[in-house]
Image (cartoon, rainbow, N blue to C red):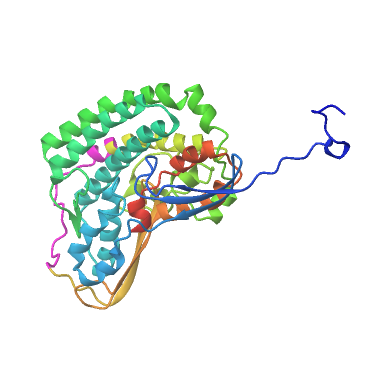
């Protein structure tokens, strides 16, 4: 027998066996808007188990509300989804106003819609830019933040802040807009409309981007509903649900706009829903500017220290990330007895434990980025 020859019992091929490996994604990772850790169990390149670990940004805002006045609670809401704070202000005020029986003047409602839609555009621009970086495209980020800064300039003009606005108040809004602000808003919208076509050229229909996202992270419609998804993550699966249409508030039933839907529930579909929603928000902003009739922006008789009658109220809005709800309970005192927040990002994050399984490690960031979570809203 030659030195290099194998013994007869060794000639049969022995199948290779792989061991599972546990790796941490995070707790600090550039692809997340906040601090998230995902425990991944992998077999080779394939993910066999994924466990999101949240709580790194938990501040206990629901408990803090129990020792603060209703006016002071609005400040807490800015810190949930800090990328889109206006709807946070709005949903708390809607619930509190139901407890107090307050009716917001028409101009106040129009300004609320106007600010929330501008904030939706700013939020989706952040997603557009950072998701491109997640996949490997840096240029869209520069375009997106150029336009986003213009919206933040508008917010700064009216509220003095660029991130946590505290603009929407109980009974209306903090202050009326000026003619100069309205002119600058119209100027921005006219500048922004053609930029949306640039985004499609840069990223939406980029062959490399589509190859990385079109058939990745598929969420069937029933799965999306079963996990309680909302916002673009739900509509990306083709489920037509938007609070602005299903349960209108602030006069949204008077605005003409469409709800973009995806087809297959892929990462690309969720991305495309957000880009398309920016076009619809532009339509709503222009209609809101035309509806700005003279009048008060704050309801009369709002107490400095409100003490609503004992009772409970629920309100929800279509935030940038989905169905954002607030449940308030009053016991007749100056602070809410209980406040519960139904945060869309928390629901949208939960599906990762099913969605990541069966995919490759190289697709994790594409899938995670497509859910567009903000950890301030997840943890609260």
Q: Is residue 218 above or below residue 144?
A: below
Q: In this view, does 136 lie above or below 26?
A: above
Q: How many marks are shown on the rendered structure?
A: 0
Residue 288 belongs to magenta span? yes
Q: Is the magenta stretch mostly helix, strand or loop?
A: loop
| Residue 26 appears left or right of 309 | right
The reply to whether residue 177 is visible in this rendering is no
The reply to whether residue 19 is visible in this rendering is yes
Seen at 58% across and 34% down, the residue is 215
Q: In which quarter of the image is the N terminus?
A: top right
Seen at 17% across and 32% down, the residue is 184
Q: Where is residue 253 in the image (x, y as percent from the top left)?
A: 36, 48
| Residue 321 appears left or right of 358 | left
Magenta residues (range):
286-304
Q: In this view, does 137 lie above or below 82?
A: above
Q: In which quarter of the image is the C terminus?
A: bottom left
| Residue 156 appears left or right of 357 | left
Seen at 23% across and 36% down, the residue is 151
Q: Position of residue 139 (x, y in %)?
A: 35, 24
Which is more toward the observer, 98 or 269? 269
Q: Where is residue 153 in the image (x, y as percent from the top left)?
A: 17, 36
Residue 36 belongs to magenta span? no
Q: Position of residue 190 (x, y in %)?
A: 26, 26
Seen at 34% across and 42% down, the residue is 255
Which is more toward the observer, 38 or 193? 38
């Amino acid at each position: 027998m030659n030195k290099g020859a194998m013994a007869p019992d060794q000639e049969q091929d022995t199948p290779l066996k792989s061991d599972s490996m546990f790796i941490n994604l995070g707790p600090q990772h550039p692809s997340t808007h906040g601090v998230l850790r995902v425990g991944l169990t992998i077999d080779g390149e394939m993910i066999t188990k994924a466990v999101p670990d949240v709580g790194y940004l938990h501040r206990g805002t629901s408990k803090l509300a129990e020792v603060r006045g209703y006016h002071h609670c609005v400040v807490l809401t800015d810190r949930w989804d800090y990328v889109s704070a206006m709807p946070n202000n709005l949903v708390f005020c809607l619930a509190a106003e139901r407890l107090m029986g307050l009716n917001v003047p028409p101009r106040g409602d129009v300004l609320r819609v106007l600010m929330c839609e501008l904030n939706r555009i700013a939020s989706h621009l952040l997603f557009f830019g950072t998701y491109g970086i997640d996949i490997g495209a840096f240029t869209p980020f520069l375009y997106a933040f150029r336009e986003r800064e213009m919206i933040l300039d508008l917010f700064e003009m009216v509220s003095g802040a660029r991130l946590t606005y505290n603009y929407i108040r109980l009974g209306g809004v903090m202050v009326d807009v000026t003619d100069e602000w309205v002119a600058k808003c119209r100027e921005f919208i006219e500048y922004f409309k053609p930029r949306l076509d640039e985004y499609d050229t840069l990223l939406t229909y980029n062959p490399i981007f589509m190859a990385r996202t079109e058939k990745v992270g598929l969420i069937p419609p029933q799965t999306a509903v079963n996990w309680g998804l909302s916002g673009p993550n739900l509509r990306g699966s083709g489920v037509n649900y938007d609070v602005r249409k299903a349960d209108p508030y602030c006069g949204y039933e008077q605005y003409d706009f469409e709800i973009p839907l995806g087809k297959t529930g892929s990462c690309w579909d969720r991305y495309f829903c957000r880009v398309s929603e920016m076009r619809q928000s532009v339509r709503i902003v222009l209609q809101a500017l035309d509806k700005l009739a003279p009048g008060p922006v704050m309801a009369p008789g709002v107490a400095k220290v409100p003490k609503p009658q004992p009772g409970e109220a629920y309100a929800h809005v279509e935030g940038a990330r989905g169905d954002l709800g607030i449940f308030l309970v009053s016991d007749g005192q100056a602070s809410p007895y209980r406040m519960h927040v139904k945060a869309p990002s928390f629901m949208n994050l939960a599906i990762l434990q099913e969605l990541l399984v069966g995919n490759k490690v190289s697709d994790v960031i594409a899938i995670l980025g497509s859910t567009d979570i903000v950890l301030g809203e997840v943890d609260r």
